């Protein structure tokens, strides 16, 4: 590793020394700053914090979209021994106010567009810095007291970051990650994936306030001297394609939804419009040929030099995974959770196995308990990446650890004889069938989403029946109507008929116990987490009970 200690100050000093003349961070379309300039910016912002009476152990929030300045602020806070509190820029004002109070933050770096457009009742209590210019936007009503403190040496077990999980199960909890948690995971997981080096160009489209983006993409990237480019706006398909053409990334970090959209919006329509393609994909050999032809075009759209897409944050649809394999689009699967800083399993593209999230990250240990007759059980984790606990929530911390210190991930899966990990679903989501068999909603959802008519799907048990709530792909349905206008009532009947057929076609692919008995229309898009997982408690009656 080349570090005396696994702390972010040692980590960043090593990075700047190793790559000082290399290019580091930029917005798409701008020239990147060098690692030496990056280092100077971090020192300058750290001095600002010290002059504002922010000391070792103080909590400082970061609120804004991914950017070079976000990275500077994060490292300025953590390398001085203060604690970063990153918050998603899409979090509601009420939740932001709650996090300010709960974390006891003393200062905030905030994007000026959020500062101008969002009313936050607790902002007057903080020293407010601009995330755009690092200038002071406002002083706290009660000035931060001046505290004389000798320079404290940062230790591996010191708290470095509090990540407020915006998971699928309701109110967020503050995940406490130490310097060692973060640094060990950034180094070991990025090294195991093996596609980042000092020649890498990364397109950063993940939120940095999420563990996958913050640790795996940003810190893992700079550890290897990569060049990282950020978008100025949220990634629409058009903006993303333009950015790929401009940056020509060698590495892309993304959630599965991006590839699912490409597959459903671009690949399947091409196949359906061509009689030759439609006939060829019915055989394995023909499918590989068609997918390879389409994959060559997609690789050109990606800029033509992609070494690999690191995919994590949610499960990858099996049909989409098959397309990526056949199309020769290199991808590195991964699995993790915020509480594990986050990566638990990953592997390089050339070692990926169908359906697996990779091998256990070096230094980390996984065991499967309460296994069924197929070897599927609850996944437990130990290692230097496992969190210290939830901030001010001893009860929740106790519930997520076993008596002998294993982290209970809440996921179910199994490992094969070669050490590859396979995820079957969330423990809380499992439906118990009439004969006691486990039905995994995620598997049924994947099968539903294989239909061109389905944008998103949610499966759960209602009155002991497997029920699906489906948000249809309205643009595809409208295109299929070819301009023919239907009244609202006729459109409703048309969509109902489509969903009924979707259920019949999906059920042909499922075991009898897992077949959908009821299908319902979801008229509005599902509310999602930042990693594009549906917030189940909002839609599933008595979720988790």
Image: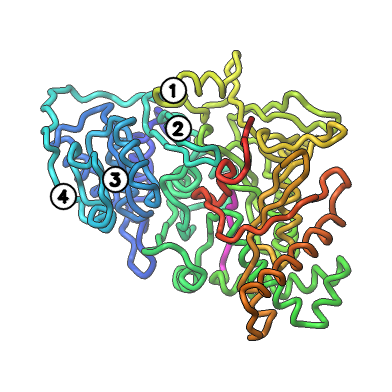
Q: How crowded is mark 2: few (under 14 residues within 10 Å), some or many (20 or more)?
A: many
Q: How crowded is mark 3: few (under 14 residues within 10 Å), some or many (20 or more)?
A: many
Question: Which of 421/531 is in front?
Answer: 531
Image location of residue 266, percent across then percent down: 65, 73
- Reading the image, the residue beneath label 1 is 393
Q: Earlier in the sequence, mark 1 or mark 3?
A: 3
Q: Earlier in the sequence, mark 1 or mark 2?
A: 2
Q: Which of marks 4 and 2 is in front?
A: 2
- Reading the image, the residue beneath label 2 is 173
How far apart, in angstroms, are the residues tagged by discs 4 and 1? 33 Å
How far apart, in angstroms, are the residues tagged by discs 1 and 3? 27 Å
Residue 14 is drawn in which quadrant? top left
Residue found at the far bottom of this picture = 483
Q: How many marks?
A: 4
The residue stretch that appears in magenta: 305-312
Mark sitting on residue 137: 4
Quarter that holds the C terminus:
top right
Question: Which of 14/77 is in front?
Answer: 77
């Amino acid at each position: 590793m080349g570090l005396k200690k696994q702390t972010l100050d040692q980590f960043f000093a090593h990075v700047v020394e190793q790559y000082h003349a290399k290019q580091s961070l930029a917005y798409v379309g701008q020239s990147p700053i060098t690692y030496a300039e990056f280092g100077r910016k971090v020192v300058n912002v750290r001095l600002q914090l010290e002059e504002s009476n922010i000391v070792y152990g103080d909590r400082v929030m970061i609120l804004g979209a991914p950017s070079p300045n976000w990275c500077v602020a994060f490292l300025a806070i953590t390398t001085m021994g203060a604690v970063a509190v990153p918050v998603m820029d899409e979090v509601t004002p009420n939740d932001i106010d709650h996090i300010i109070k709960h974390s006891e933050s003393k200062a905030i770096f905030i994007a000026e567009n959020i500062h101008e457009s969002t009313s936050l009742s607790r902002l007057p209590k903080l020293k407010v810095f601009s995330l755009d210019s690092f200038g002071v936007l406002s002083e706290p009503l009660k000035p931060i007291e001046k505290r004389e403190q000798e320079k404290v040496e940062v230790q591996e077990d010191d708290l470095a970051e509090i990540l407020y999980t915006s998971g699928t199960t309701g109110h967020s909890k503050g995940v406490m990650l130490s310097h060692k948690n973060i640094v060990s995971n950034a180094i070991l997981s990025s090294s195991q994936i093996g596609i980042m080096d000092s020649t890498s160009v990364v397109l950063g489209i993940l939120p940095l306030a999420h563990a996958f983006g913050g640790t795996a993409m940003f810190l893992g990237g700079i550890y290897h001297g990569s060049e990282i480019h950020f978008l100025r706006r949220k990634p629409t398909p058009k903006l993303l394609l333009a950015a790929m053409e401009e940056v020509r990334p060698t590495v892309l970090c993304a959630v599965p939804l991006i590839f699912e959209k490409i597959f459903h919006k671009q690949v399947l329509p091409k196949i359906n419009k061509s009689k030759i393609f439609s006939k060829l994909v019915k055989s394995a050999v023909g499918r590989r040929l068609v997918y390879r032809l389409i994959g060559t075009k997609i690789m050109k759209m990606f800029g033509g030099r992609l070494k690999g897409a690191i995919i994590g944050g949610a499960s990858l649809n099996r049909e989409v995974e098959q397309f990526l394999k056949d199309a020769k689009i290199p991808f590195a699967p991964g699995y993790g959770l915020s509480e594990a800083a986050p990566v638990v399993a990953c592997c390089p593209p050339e070692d990926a196995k169908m359906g697996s999230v990779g091998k256990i990250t070096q230094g980390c240990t996984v065991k499967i308990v309460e296994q069924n007759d197929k070897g599927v059980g609850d996944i437990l984790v130990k290692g230097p990446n496992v969190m210290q606990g939830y901030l001010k929530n001893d009860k929740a911390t106790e519930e997520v650890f076993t008596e002998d210190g294993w982290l209970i991930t809440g996921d179910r899966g199994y490992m094969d004889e070669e050490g590859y990990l396979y995820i079957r679903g969330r423990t809380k989501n499992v439906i118990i069938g009439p004969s006691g068999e486990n039905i995994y909603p995620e598997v049924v959802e994947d099968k539903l989403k294989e239909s061109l008519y389905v944008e998103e799907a949610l499966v759960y048990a209602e009155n002991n029946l497997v029920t699906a709530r489906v948000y249809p792909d309205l643009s595809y349905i409208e295109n299929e109507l070819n301009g023919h206008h239907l009244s609202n009532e006729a459109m409703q009947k048309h969509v109902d008929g489509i969903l009924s057929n979707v259920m019949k076609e999906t059920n042909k692919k499922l075991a009898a116990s897992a077949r959908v008995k009821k299908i319902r229309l979801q008229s509005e898009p599902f509310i999602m987490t930042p990693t594009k997982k549906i917030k189940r408690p909002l839609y599933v009656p008595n979720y988790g009970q």
